[in-house]
Amino acid sequence: MKIGITCYPTYGGSGVVATELGIELAARGHQVHFITYQQPFRLTGREVGIYFHEVAVTSYPLFQYPPYDLALASRMAEVAEFYGLDLLHVHYAIPHSVSALLARQMMAAKGLRLPFITTLHGTDITLVGQDPGYLPITKFGIEESDGVTSISADLKAVTERSFGVQKDIEVIRNFVNCDVYKPFEDEAKRTELRARYAAPNEKIIIHLSNFRRVKRVGDVVEVFARIAREVPAKLMLIGDGPDRSIAESLALRYGIQSKIHFLGKQDSVQELLPLGDLLLMPSEMESFGLAALEGMACGVPCIATDVGGVPELVEHDYNGLLYRVGDVLGMGAGGIELLLNEPRLKQMGLNARKTAQDKFCTSRIIPMYERYYEHVLQARNGADGTP
Ligand code: GMT
């Protein structure tokens, strides 16, 4: 198939999922065309079967807000016609589904069919999509899509409940390549790399996010401060974003700044995650929690909050621990107990890896997307009536 993919290329889990999906589809022989304002950050530009089409947004003195969604729609239609795309797959409803809808109409005017699939990721529904200024158009974009998928059953339920959407939503959960995200096979190499961040007797705790408010980065430091009083440990903070200064000021307040590595945005997180003993994801909301899954595939169990789609992935006391949002005392105590119990920690790491392999591995999830694409393509007529 020839598939056009649009996503936010520089920021957030939806862009990561879209990019990894494109890479996996290309590896299975599909032709994948990314249509975005920048090359997605996990692509090198040299992957076989993957093409990148930049969306240039022309500015003009009249435009206080250059119309990206229109430029995107126009580029989608151009690429679709030039390369004969079979379908568009847009990630994150706002504004991508509406741009795809326009592109489909532009193609229909030429007698060409361009169905599009929207994948809902989370804040497009739970946060931004709830804004009264965006809700009607988000709902419209979803309902007009030829197919809609959701990355968790919870997000599907939220979409149906809060948007009153009647359309069938297919749950296709997020995935991880377990051959890329895996524990270190060479223990000596792991020890050598760990030494860059921690002394041999210290545990390594990891947090990976885009440091937005919803991630509660302050809670990460609060929990770590409690753990560090009882267990020799270092904290690796991977990522960057608006709340990084909250983490920095809390670190100073607790006097633990020398125990925290602020690593900023990292391209190859699969090289860092397997160095950890425990991952912290105390988010306010998480429709899935891709960071937790990537850690789990690397054999790192997770302390997370019992929100959104997280329980579809993290099972309390089996492959991680779940707490109420803001329960930093509970998370701290749970973390200390786990880190001091080596056999339990090890078993949870094994269980975490097994969950990733059994339920969320690319080999299981990518064929679901392929089947769904076939299903949408086989629908007798396009939603716009084109054959
Ligand atoms: O929260 C993020 O990291 C960004 C956001 C996005 O849409 O870019 O993530 C959402 O999509 C991820 C990938 O499907 C999910 O793993 C995250 O749980 C979800 N974030 C939230 O629901 C807050």
Image (cartoon, rainbow, N blue to C red):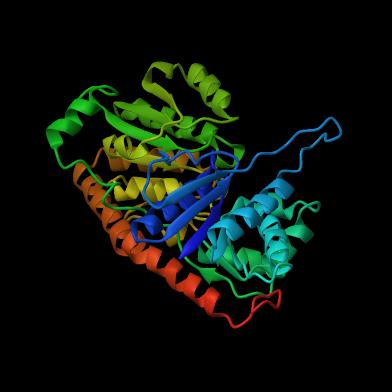
> Is 25 placed above or below 46 here?
below
Q: In the figure, is residue 263 to the left or right of 248?
A: left
Q: Which image quarter holds the N terminus?
A: bottom left
Where residue 256 sits, quadrant-wise, is top left
Q: Could you tell me residue 93's position as x and y percent?
A: 64, 56
Q: Could you tell me residue 323's position as x and y percent?
A: 47, 49
Q: Residue furthest bottom?
A: 380
Q: Is residue 361 visible?
A: no
Q: Can residue 194 be seen in this view?
A: yes
Q: Nearer the viewer, residue 121 or 55?
A: 55
Q: Which image quarter holds the C terminus?
A: bottom right
Q: Could you tell me residue 185's position as x and y percent?
A: 16, 42
> Is 99 placed above or below 142 here?
above
Q: Which residue is drawn at 76% across and 43% down?
A: 67
Q: In the figure, is residue 46 to the left or right of 327?
A: left
Q: Which of 193 and 9 is in front in this view?
A: 9
